[in-house]
Image: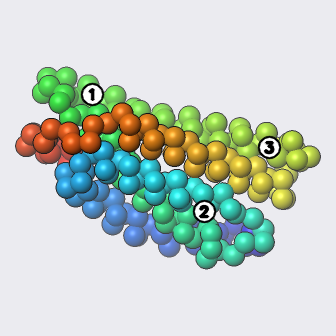
Amino acid sequence: MGRAADDRGHAGLLLAGPLVELASWRRLFAPRWGPRTTMLSGLVLGTVGLYFLGRLGDDRPYLSPILPGMVVFPSGALLTFAGAAVVALSGTPREPAGIAGGLLGAATELGPTAGFVALVSIASSWTIVLGGDATDTGAGRVAGYGLALDVAAVGFLVVAVVTYVALPRRPEAPSRQDEQRSTSL
């Protein structure tokens, strides 16, 4: 992509402040919009962000498509996790709520990690198919990551469709206890 690794790392650090601020706002979305709309918004934003990131290449400038993808995808992921937390914990009786929260925490750590492993496998496999090897740092590796990000975008889109179909449109209004539990996450 025409930049030294340090330059790319520093460019990514520029996004840390706005994303930390957005993370503090996540508590506002699920109670206002409801978990379904929050999750759907996040999944659609995540799909768009991954689509942008999948367009990466040596001939692409940083400002488009990399920067929009680096802003939009994490924003979508934050909304998706905020909505999913409300869905997962709503209606959980008080006694097993700690167990449910622990399972949710484990799932939010293991799920993305397993997805990342799968996407790196796809990227590496595609690099090899294109004639590269495990040490390839050229166009084959970039194409492999592009394919992996496109696969992730399709995965987000599929989950968005399942969320749209499976979650009720107008869930019961959350109890005060459910709202307090969702904002403490």
Q: Earlier in the sequence, mark 3 or mark 1?
A: 1
Q: Which residue matches tag 2?
A: 52
Horizontal side of 61 relative to 153 (left or right) equals right
Residue type beneath disc 3: Trp
SS assignment at label 1? helix
Q: Which residue matches tag 3?
A: 126
* Number of numbered markers: 3
Residue in the picture at 54% in, 64% down: 70
User: Residue 115's mark?
Assistant: none
Residue in the picture at 53% in, 59% down: 48
User: Residue 100's mark?
Assistant: 1
Picture coordinates of residue 60, whole percent (x, y): 72, 72
Q: Quadrant of residue 170?
A: top left
Look at the picture and state if 40 lies above or below 14.
above
Q: Earlier in the sequence, mark 3 or mark 2?
A: 2
Alpha carbons under labels 1 and 2: distance apart: 35 Å
Picture coordinates of residue 24, whole percent (x, y): 28, 60
Alpha carbons under labels 3 and 2: distance apart: 19 Å
Alpha carbons under labels 3 and 1: distance apart: 38 Å
Horizontal side of 178 relative to 16 (left or right) equals left
Residue in the picture at 27% in, 28% down: 100
Q: Residue furthest right?
A: 131
Residue type beneath disc 1: Ala
SS assignment at label 2? helix
Closest to the camera, between mark 3 and mark 1, is 3
Residue type beneath disc 2: Phe
Quadrant position of the N terminus in the picture: bottom right
* Disc 1 residue crowd, few under 14, some 14–19, many 20+, Cα 10 Å: some
